[in-house]
Amino acid sequence: MKNASARFELEAPVSDPLLLEIEPLLALAARAPSSHNSQPWRVRRVALPQRWAATGPWTQALSLELDPARCLRALPSLQREMLISLGGFAAILLNLLRLSGWPVKAVHLDPDGGAEGPLLLLLGAHALAERADPAGLARLSRALRLRHTERGPYLPHQGLRFHLEAGDSPLPHTLELDSQGPSLCWQALYAPPARAELAGFYARHGARDLTHPKAWAETYAHLSFAGERAQPQASQGIAIERLFGPLPAWRRRLLQLLLHPLCLRGPGGWAVTAQAGRQLHALIMSSPALLYLSAARAADPALEGLRAGESIARLWLAATDAGQALHPLSVALQHEDLAQGLAGLLGCRDRVLFIARAGTPQQPMCQAHHRRRAPAAFCSSFAALSSSTAVSRP
């Protein structure tokens, strides 16, 4: 059985002078989290729009967009998750550039305005040594190398060592999109009864994707059963060990069979989904806190997603910097009936955009192996664009 994660992508060497100069920063930014490790972003070097040419030090521009070929599509809600992924990537890239001394500004564009989008990064001609922050860059780089989704148990009696406002995050600069749209609000559940109620909810519904043929087929296509050691340089997909821990080859192959969408439709799927629910219950109960991000319903869903992605990246890197981890519990937000039930349990009248368990992993955190595409796979320069290139809109 082959998976979509085993597909190879053709990579043209990065030859554009700007992209070549910032290639190490692009590779670091690609460590941003994304649903199913889909990495749905692309970066294109574009001509600086005329309206910005005479305002400030801007001489060049990058367009940050969703790549339609990499976006998850099984559920309507996944479009928001793709925008969240793009927002986190954009915020991280802007910070890496600014901490390296680049003059850089993010511009959110009107999708009906006929420009590239949904975000432009305006840059100066080159990095300026006097504007660089080497200590801040080193701190952010370290957090990006350590950050990963820790799906194992946490230490239940070790509280959070970071603040929800993330004022001291390794991500100090913002995309400056906060003046538009509804405000975002982080909240936490610490009380054991509240966490137990949420754990029961996820025990009943947390395996919904396994019973949704289209959603699970898409998830399964992003799983890799070859083993981390067999594919040390894999650039995409989720290694099955990240879900179940170290596995011998025979268990990886057994899971490849048991988790196949066709197998899950039969009687054997009931046992798998029941076990998944019990496991999620135990993981939530091991966590000292559940965190969630909410916002009033926005008139501009693209802006809402980008801002949420920035906020999530800032908090996640603050947690990593403090030696702690997050594990998103996204399934309840991907299905509308579950999203409504979750909001009711939380007593939240606004839209919940993100929820995760947080805490200190039982296993010490170390530098993670990230399956990430090289910049050559998601960047293109002037030479790769035609004058009639169509821009996909979120």
Image (spheres, rainbow, N blue to C red):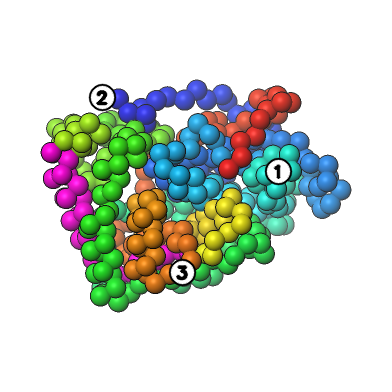
Q: Return the x and y of residue 140 as percentages of the image width and height.
A: 52, 56
Q: Amino acid at mark 2?
A: Met
Q: Is residue 14 above or below residue 208?
A: above
Identify whether 317 is placed above or below 377. Answer: below
* Label 1 crowd bin: few (<14), some (14–19), many (20+), radius 10 Å: few
Q: Is residue 288 magenta?
A: yes
Where is mark 3, residue-wise?
A: 349
- 2 and 3 marks in contact (CB < 8 Å): no
Q: Which residue lies under the disc numbered 1?
A: 112
Q: Position of residue 123 (x, y in %)?
A: 72, 46
Residue at screen point 61% across, 36% down: 392
Query: SS at mark 1?
Result: loop
What range is drawn magenta here?
A: 267-294
Name the kind of residue labelled 3 in the image.
Arg
Q: Position of residue 25 (x, y in %)?
A: 57, 44
The N terminus lies in quadrant: top left
Other-residue count near label 3 (Cα within 10 Å), few / some / many at <14 / 14–19 / ≥20 = few
> Camera-side residue: 270 or 151?
270
Q: State whether residue 353 appears in this view.
A: yes
Q: Is residue 315 left or right of residue 161?
A: right
On the question of residue 61 being in view, the answer is no
Give the image location of residue 66, x and y in percent.
56, 39
Q: Work out whether residue 155 or residue 368 is closer to the camera in this orientation and state it.
A: 155
Assign the magenta stretch its main secondary structure: helix
Please name the residue that numbered disc 2 is placed on: 1
Report the Cα–Cα distance between label 3 and label 1: 30 Å
Answer with mark 2 or mark 3, whichever residue precedes in sequence. 2
Q: CA distance from mark 2 to mark 3?
A: 44 Å
Side of 65 where 335 appears, left or right = left
Q: Residue at x 40, y 39 (%)?
A: 74
